[in-house]
Image (spheres, rainbow, N blue to C red):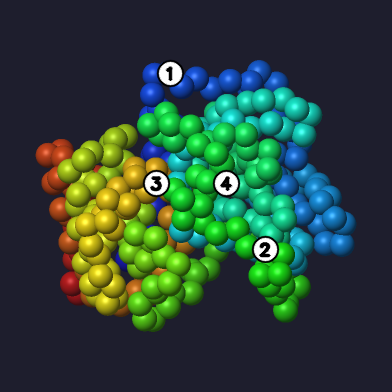
């Protein structure tokens, strides 16, 4: 067990808490059960666009793409929370709040796998059936424009989607996922918009800090500043500059973040393998975070102190 494993207990307290939306927002169209193709899609090999129900044995529905032409492209967007207007396969419209887990695409058709706060369960949404995105401030957006500009995603064409050389995996239990590979050097791309390289560099730590900050049910402005400062120092360790336009772009990204325990379990696995200097940096900012809003949760404080003592050993 790694030094960060105890943090996972804190995350489950608020992972399914619906995001705060303007008073004018109201969920709609949820009187009837969701379509079967929203409760756990499995895109089968060799059958174009075919889907079957694939519930996980723990009672939660997970989205798994078995077609080797599909790939996941939303690692940086995982944990982003917003609302959508969605039209299902029967033409029924619904409005609901979701926390994004992944976006799968083959360059032509894409699926959003997310936690639906109205259903309190995992759901899958075909991207071309998302009619509108409603951000946390109530502003409405074209879905594709929002995913590209606000979430920083790129939709590849069919030609750019690579096929894996190994057979597709069975449906994944996220809590058992292995940590993703991390580049050793600076991860800066010529197409990067402000804040993109910085959120990649600090991805795991910033999600842990956001989850800790939300443990009391609210993300305070003072806590956001602490998290931004953490990102800046983590970027400095990685040799990536962080300027004011980057901080400005990161602010709405952090406000949308409401990472679930399965996302955070991946972050914790990666942090357990991170260099000690990065672990110490995260602990230092976790301590600062608890003081930022002037309120200390005893359970959080005791846990951070135990982790700090173990790292110092």
Residue 122, given in percent of the width and then of the height, sits at 60, 41
Q: On the image, numbered disc 4 is attached to which residue?
A: 144
Which is closer to the viewer, label 4 or label 3? 4
Extreme residue in the bottom direction: 184
Residue 178, given in percent of the width and then of the height, sits at 53, 68
Q: On the image, numbered disc 1 is attached to which residue?
A: 24
Looking at the image, do the residues carrying marks 3 and 2 touch, with CB atoms under 8 Å apart? no
Which residue is nearer to you in this view: 213 or 76?
Answer: 76
Which is closer to the viewer, label 2 or label 1? 2
Graded by Cα atoms within 10 Å as few (under 14), some (14 to 19) or many (20 or more), the crowding at tag 3 reads many
Q: Quadrant of the C terminus?
A: bottom left
Residue 238 vs residue 102: left or right?
left
* Residue 6 in view (yes/no): no
CA gap between label 4 and label 2 equals: 14 Å
Graded by Cα atoms within 10 Å as few (under 14), some (14 to 19) or many (20 or more), the crowding at tag 1 reads few
Say which mark, if any, is on residue 157: 2
Q: Earlier in the sequence, mark 4 or mark 3?
A: 4
Q: Quadrant of the N terminus?
A: bottom left
Which residue is nearer to you in this view: 231 or 248?
Answer: 248
Residue under the point 41% across and 68% down? 270
Q: On the image, numbered disc 3 is attached to which residue?
A: 257
Q: Is residue 179 above or below residue 226?
A: below
CA gap between label 4 and label 3 equals: 19 Å
Q: Is residue 198 above or below residue 39?
A: below
Residue 104, given in percent of the width and then of the height, sits at 64, 56
């Amino acid at each position: 067990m790694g030094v960060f494993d105890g943090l996972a207990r804190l995350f489950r307290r608020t992972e399914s808490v619906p995001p705060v939306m303007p008073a004018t927002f109201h969920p709609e169209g949820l009187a009837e059960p969701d379509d079967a193709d929203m409760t756990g899609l499995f895109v089968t090999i060799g059958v174009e666009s075919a889907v079957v129900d694939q519930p996980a044995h723990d009672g939660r529905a997970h989205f798994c793409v078995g077609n080797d032409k599909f790939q996941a492209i939303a690692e940086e967007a995982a944990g982003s929370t917003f609302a959508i207007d969605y039209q299902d396969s029967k033409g029924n419209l619904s409005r609901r709040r979701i926390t994004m887990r992944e976006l799968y695409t083959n360059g032509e058709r894409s699926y959003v796998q997310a936690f639906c706060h109205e259903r309190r369960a995992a759901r899958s949404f075909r991207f071309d059936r998302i009619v509108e995105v409603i951000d946390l401030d109530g502003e409405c957006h074209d879905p594709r424009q929002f995913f590209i500009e606000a979430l920083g995603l790129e939709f590849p064409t069919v030609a750019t989607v690579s096929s894996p050389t190994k057979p597709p995996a069975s449906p994944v239990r996220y809590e058992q996922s292995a940590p993703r590979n991390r580049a050793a050097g600076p991860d800066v791309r010529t197409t990067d918009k402000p804040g993109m390289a910085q959120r990649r560099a600090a991805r795991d730590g910033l999600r842990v800090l956001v989850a800790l900050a939300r443990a009391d049910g609210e993300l305070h402005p003072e806590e956001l500043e602490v998290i931004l400062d953490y990102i800046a120092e983590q970027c400095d360790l990685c040799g990536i500059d962080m300027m004011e336009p980057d901080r400005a772009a990161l602010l709405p990204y952090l406000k949308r973040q409401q990472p679930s325990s399965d996302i955070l379990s991946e972050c914790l696995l990666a942090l357990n393998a991170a260099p000690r200097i990065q672990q110490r940096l995260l602990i230092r900012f976790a301590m600062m975070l608890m003081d930022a809003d002037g309120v200390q949760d005893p359970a959080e404080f005791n846990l951070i102190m135990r982790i700090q003592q173990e790292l110092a050993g």
